[in-house]
Amino acid sequence: MEATASPASVPAQTVPQHLQALERANRVRLARAELKRSIAGGDVPVTRVITECPWESETMTLSELLRSQSRWGRTRTRKLLASVGLSENKRLETLTERQRMLLVSQLRPH
C-alpha cells in the first residue's frame, strides 16, 4: 500500500498550481469573512479598511465592503458611491489616494 502525501505536507513547488490557488482562495475567503464580521460588529471602522487596504480586502468591491457595515444595503451604498463618482464594482486595491480620501470624508460623521 503506497502512502500518498497530502498537499499540506508536500513542498510548495511540487503542489499543483490549481491546488495552490484553491488554498489561497480559501485563506482569503476566511480572512475576508472575519474582516466583514469585525466591520459589522463595529470593531473595525470601514474607513480604516479603505485607507490601509489590508491584504484580505484588496480584491473586494466597494459595494461588498460598504455593505458589510451594519444597516448598509444596496440603496445606501449606491447613493454614496454615485455621490463621489465611483463604481460599485471598483476594487479597493484600484482606488487612488485621492479617491480613498474622498470616500473616507463622505463616510466620516460631520
Image (cartoon, rainbow, N blue to C red):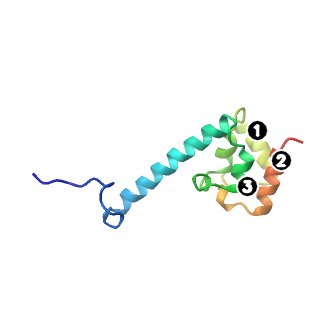
What's the amino acid at mark 3? Thr
SS class, disc 2:
helix
Which of the two discs, 3 and 1, sits closer to the camera? 3
Tell me which corner region of the image, top left, top right, bottom left or bottom right, holds residue 102.
bottom right
> Is residue 32 placed above or below 8 in the rendered structure?
above
Choose mark 1 or mark 2, whichever is in front.
2
The answer to whether 54 appears left or right of 105 in the picture is left
Q: Tell me which label, 3 or 2, sits earlier in the chain.
A: 3
Q: What residue would you read off at disc 3?
A: 51
The residue carrying mark 2 is 106
**Mark 3 vs mark 1, CA separation in Å:** 21 Å
71, above or below 80, in the image: above
Of the two numbered discs 3 and 2 in the rendering, the one whose residue sits closer to the viewer: 3
> Callout 3: 10 Å neighbours few (<14), some, many (20+)?
some
Residue sitting at the far left: 1
Residue placed at 76% from the left, 38% from the top?
76
Kind of residue at disc 2: Gln
Decide which of 31, 81 is in the foreground and name it: 31
Q: Tell me where residue 42 appears, x and y as whole percent.
A: 70, 36
Amino acid type, callout 1 = Arg
Residue 45: % across, % down: 72, 43
Q: Which residue is under mark 1? A: 76
Seen at 79% across and 52% down, the residue is 103
Q: Earlier in the sequence, mark 1 or mark 2?
A: 1
Is residue 101 in sight in this rendering?
A: yes
Point out residue 71 in the picture as x, y percentages from the top left corner. Answer: 72, 32
Residue at image point 61% right, 56% down: 58
Disc 2 crowd rating (10 Å Cα; few below 14, some 14-19, many 20+) is some
